[in-house]
Amino acid sequence: MAKELVQTYSSPGDTILDPFSGSGTVPLEAAIEKREAIGIDRNPYSILLSKAKLHPPKSEEEAKESAEKYLSKIEPESGVGTDDIPEWVAEFFHPKTLSGIVQLAPLLRENDEHFLLACLLGILHHQRPGFLSYPASNLRPYLRDEKFPRDQYPEKYEYREIRPRLFSKIERAFRRAPEFDNSLQQTIYSGDSAEVINEEIQKDRLDTIITSPPYMNKLDYGRDNRLRLYFLGVEDYEDLDGSPENRQQYRDFLDNFLSEATNALQPGGNLIFVMGESQRSGAAVDTSEVLANMVKNEEYGMSVKEAVQDKVPQREINSMSTKSETILVLEN
């Protein structure tokens, strides 16, 4: 969807903003399609993923050489460097594996090795042998020791060396790596979207804004990435889960954003929202309807140009998730 929206509502050389950029899908597609890209997010893991995608090493060989340099500086041993690690973190790893992660992650952070750090955190937890943790869920970190008891699967609780797993992850990343023009400016900001737009983006600079804003009390991104966030230096992940919880909070949130976004967007520029209908306790809340009514009733100087509804496949739906999405195109 991101590629199609970029191609439809912008042209090569344009500047595209995603103010809630998540893992960087829109900025990456913008870069591939020869647009300048700006992304904003307040989740450090999202920022890391975006920077890793937009600023990778020049080659797989270069990435492996850099990884080898940092790996040569660590000496994993059970108990080394792990005294202050919380129990909820330590329980996921063999003590020697944990020692290696605790030594390597700060080295990569301090040297702005976004790609390598994203690769390391990408193999942090799973039940497969190519990952670093004991058997665990990949999406939301929890141990799967009931399905894989230690006495029946002792091999799954042995030391897992970082080097071969990190190198395999690098290889997988480069097999999927797209090509794009590095001469075009690609910038990722960390912080509140409205504040960053106000402070960093000049008036009328943007040609197009494409985004999917947070839903009302919808997802717990901090909780779901709490293990990865810990190794990014974030211990209180709950601070990242502050989505609006009701219609009024959502209106206030959108009002704050729209007031800044319309100033940064060129006259005639498009603002494309991909918004969901949330199902919570049997009640549907159409967030696109909330936004459309605000645009019609408030003084933003924008008009609703187009609205297209897209059903989410049933296999992707659970009791707390979006059952349909609306692509809402606004014109400045």
Image (cartoon, rainbow, N blue to C red):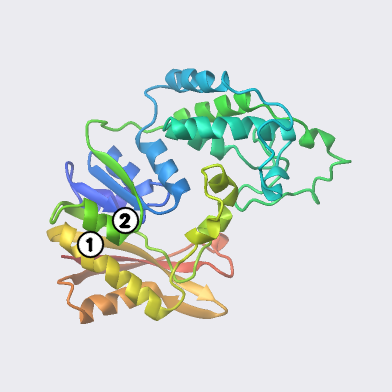
Query: Furthest-front residue in view?
Result: 83
Residue in the picture at 56% in, 69% down: 320
Q: Name the residue under label 1.
A: 261
Please tell me whether residue 245 is drawn above or below residue 51 in the rendered image: below
Residue 149 image-quadrant placement:
top right
Residue 155: which disc? none
The foreground one among 189 and 84 is 84
> Residue 156: percent from the left, percent from the top?
77, 36
Judged from the image, the secondary structure of the residue bearing numbered disc 2 is loop
Q: Name the residue under label 2.
A: 19
71 vs 211, left or right, is right
Question: Quick one: quadrant of the C terminus?
Answer: bottom left
> Residue 103: percent from the left, percent from the top?
59, 30
Please tell me whether residue 23 is drawn above or below residue 96 in the rendered image: below
Residue in the picture at 48% in, 17% down: 65
The foreground one among 153 and 196 is 196
Please tell me whether residue 157 is drawn above or below residue 308 in the rendered image: above
Query: Furthest-right residue in view?
Result: 151
Is residue 176 visible to us here? no
As shown in the figure, which amino acid type bears the numbered disc 2?
Pro
As shown in the figure, which amino acid type bears the numbered disc 1?
Ala
> Residue 47: percent from the left, percent from the top?
41, 46
Q: Do the residues labelled 2 and 1 touch (CB within 8 Å)?
A: yes
